[in-house]
Amino acid sequence: MESNPEMNKLFLLLLIIFSNTSHAQQPQQGKIIPEYGKTYKVESPGFETDTTSLMKVVFDVGRSFDQSAPNKLIQTAARYLNMHGQAGLKPENMKVALVLHGKAVQDVLKNQAYLERFPEAELNLNLPLIKALKEKGVRIILCGQSAAFYNIDRKNASEDVQFALSAMTALVQLQNDNYRLINF
């Protein structure tokens, strides 16, 4: 049987493509909040992480997604803590806040209120995440305006959140205190 150079090249190309995809990196569990916020290891980054500075960040969270999983924007705070902890930043050098507004305020509802609003859900899967974040010093701040619009008050909201006059108020005050805004 004759060898076809074009077929050999195609076979070699396919072999390279498929062998590279099978070695995709798997996300790693974090050490600060192990249950949430898996990250990927970055070998020899060209932009070095300053592990000596105080990193103050506020995440602007205004969206909610599927009720069958924790809000991926809230999970970003856990990922932030885990990846920077793995990079060598001390937890005491990370100040993190979340400001929830819009539909995202519903993600802080206690289970009974959440199930009344979303009967297809089994539980509010955001509550354990919010508790884990709070235990690590993350401030979870709820827009009072959005909360009122969605009929959320201190009785039906997680005790792990703080109410603010508005998201705008909280975002401005935190930025005045040198928190850096991250908005996805």
Image: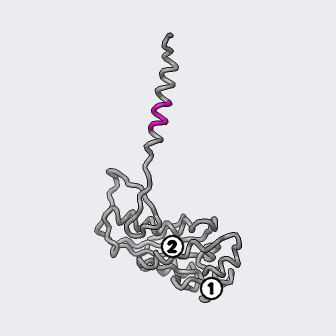
Q: Check whether the beta carbons of the residues at disc 1 and disc 2 lie within 8 A of each other.
A: no
Q: Quadrant of the C terminus?
A: bottom right
**Which label number is shown at residue 72?**
none
Extreme residue in the left direction: 52
Q: Is 172 above or below relative to 84? A: below
How many numbered discs, if any?
2
Question: Dot 1, crowdedness within 10 Å: few (<14), some or many (≥20)?
Answer: some
Q: Which stretch is magenta?
A: 14-19
In the picture, residue 93 is in which quadrant? bottom left
Secondary structure at numbered mark 2:
helix
Q: What element carries label 1?
A: loop
**Is residue 80 magenta-colored?**
no
Residue 35 location (% of width, % of height):
46, 67
Q: Nearer the viewer, residue 105 or 166?
A: 105
Mark 1–mark 2 Cα distance, whole angstroms, equals 17 Å
Identify the residue position indicated by label 2 in the image: 129
